[in-house]
Image: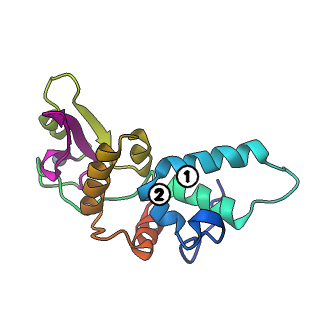
Amino acid sequence: MEDNYRPSRPYIFKRREMKGLSMEKLAFLDYRRLMSMQKELCRTKNVANGKSPFELHLNWILTQGEKVDTEMLCPQCKQSKIRNFMFTRRNGEPFVSLEYTACDDPNCIRSIKPSKNGVKVLPFKLSTLGHFSDKEEKKRVVSLFKRAFGLEKLRKDHIFELLCKAE
Ligand SMILES: [Zn+2]
């Protein structure tokens, strides 16, 4: 990873069906797409050429997305920011809630994870969005992420700021 790559603005796609869409927004809407873009880059890589702005920005988003900080305090201890959430299905529907979130303290995590099958505790990292392929599950989890990160609307500038702040 290029430690010295510091973009000054979001990356906007210029070609084909994604024209006008930002890579920042795509990270929330379709994280798997970013993963397949990276795979494709690795497959077709020409080592002689340096990295393109597209590749630098993609790597930057994938890296920063693992370190983003939420805006909400842990409802269990009310001391640290939330870093994990519970995911389960209730009455056949995907279920997530800000009440069932926790910081990294094992006690807080324990209190959102009842010893029941099918209950997962997942981290608030953008790569977590890539775990979900079911449309409804993805919708619920993205909506939880928006609230946890204080992104009421998925605006590219706000997502970009969030990624810039991540350490
Ligand atoms: Zn806590």
Looking at the image, what colour scheme do you see? rainbow
Q: Which mark is residue 34?
A: 1
**Rendered image quadrant of residue 8:** bottom right
Q: Does the numbered disc 2 mark a residue whose Cβ is under 8 Å from ligand 1?
A: no
Horizontal side of 95 relative to 135 (left or right) equals: left
* Amino acid at the residue labelled 1: Leu
Extreme residue in the front direction: 17
Residue beneath the point at 16% across and 55% down: 79
Residue under pointer 2: 27
Circle 2 packing at 10 Å, graded few (<14), some (14-19), many (20+), is many
- Give whichever of discs 1 and 2 has the lower sequence position: 2
Q: What percent of the width, then of the height, locates residue 139? A: 30, 52
> 98 or 110: nearer the eye?
98
Question: In the rendered view, would you say 52 is above or below 138?
Answer: below
Q: What percent of the width, then of the height, locates residue 119? A: 21, 30
Residue beneath the point at 78% across and 46% down: 44
Q: How many callouts does the rendering have? A: 2
Q: Are marks 1 and 2 in contact (CB under 8 Å)?
A: yes
Extreme residue in the right direction: 48
Q: What percent of the width, then of the height, locates residue 14? A: 64, 72
**Rendered image quadrant of residue 151:** bottom left
Question: In the rendered view, would you say 90 is above or below 51?
Answer: above
> 57 or 43: nearer the eye?
43
Asked which secondary structure carries label 1, the reply is helix
Q: Which residues are magenta?
A: 81-102
